[in-house]
Image (cartoon, rainbow, N blue to C red):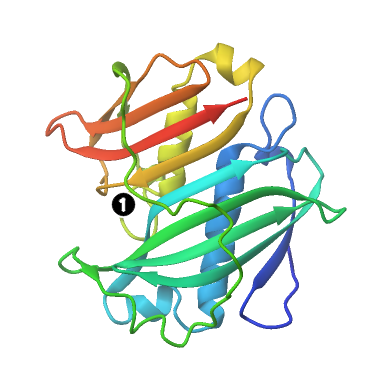
Amino acid sequence: METVNENLTTYKECFQIGSFDTDLNGKAKLTSICNYLQEIAGNHVDLIHQGVDDLKANNMAWVLSRLRLKMLHFPVWKDKIEIKTWSIGTDGLFGNREFEISNSRGETIAIASSSWLVINTLNKRPVRPQKIVENMPMNMASPLFENSLGKLQINEELFPKENILIHYSDIDINQHVNNVKYIKWIIDSCPLELLTHKEIEQLEINFLHETKLNDELKIFQSNPTNRSEIVLKNNNTNREHCRAIINWK
């Protein structure tokens, strides 16, 4: 990983796709891309003293709530990529951040938009982020997507696919399931025919409620064609923990 930065309005890092980040075809896994996004976002807020440790000192934490990721081209093993990220301000309870990924030739291969909540870790309630981000350098560039992030609407009939038992390795520093784990389970639940013959063009996901160690989730999914609608619910309480839509090409 290489860091390249001139100012903190836009933060950049370079990554090389490792063999452990690729699928059976040698292409970067979407979960690996999402891990990169999570990493660079955390590194950016660390530099402006609004990172994990800074918020933890005040019993607060950043939590990813919404994500939209559009892949124009998947990088492959050993490719070098550059990821840029920047804050675009707040909207109500959400702090919003965007990402752009380019290849070694400077061509854009992916874009992403995200909405984050600041949570009080003692009572698990959201905290208004305006005070926290007031000193964050803002990028005034035009939005990467025409439509802003919102609550996903599930329109198709859903069918149970499989159960997921939460294990120790699923839990992150915030003591709940890491957001990329949900994305892994969602992708793995899709039919092999789609996974081997098509590519994910766009993933959009809402993270609704946290999941803890030893919880059990059930995955529900529509009958996919070029679009998959997926919901994860708690197997005991029926509470919905996340919902996602995948567009295939």
Location of residue 224 by image quarter: top left
Left or right of 116: which side holds 246?
right
Query: Residue placed at 29% from the left, 73% from the top?
Result: 60
Q: Residues within 10 Å of mark 1 (few under 14, many from 20)?
A: some
| Residue 170 to residue 95: above or below | above
Location of residue 118 by image quarter: bottom left
Q: Amino acid at mark 1?
A: His
Quarter in which the C terminus is drawn: top right
Query: Residue placed at 56% from the left, 51% from the top?
Result: 35
Depth check: give the residue in front, 174 or 150.
150
- Pinpoint residue 104: horizontal percent, then vertical percent: 85, 53
Quarter in which the N terminus is drawn: bottom right
Left or right of 56: which side holds 226?
right
Find the residue positioned furthest to the front: 146
- Count up the numbered dots: 1
| Residue 156 to residue 51: above or below | above
- Pinpoint residue 114: horizontal percent, then vertical percent: 47, 57
Find the residue positioned furthest to the right: 105
Query: Residue placed at 81% from the left, 46% from the top?
Result: 79
Depth check: give the residue in front, 150 or 10.
150
Per the image, label 1 sits on a secondary structure element best described as loop
Query: Residue placed at 19% from the left, 63% from the top?
Result: 124
Find the residue positioned furthest to the bottom: 135
Left or right of 214: which side holds 25?
right
| Residue 134 to residue 230: above or below | below
Q: Which residue is mark 1?
A: 176
- Pinpoint residue 62: horizontal percent, then vertical percent: 37, 66
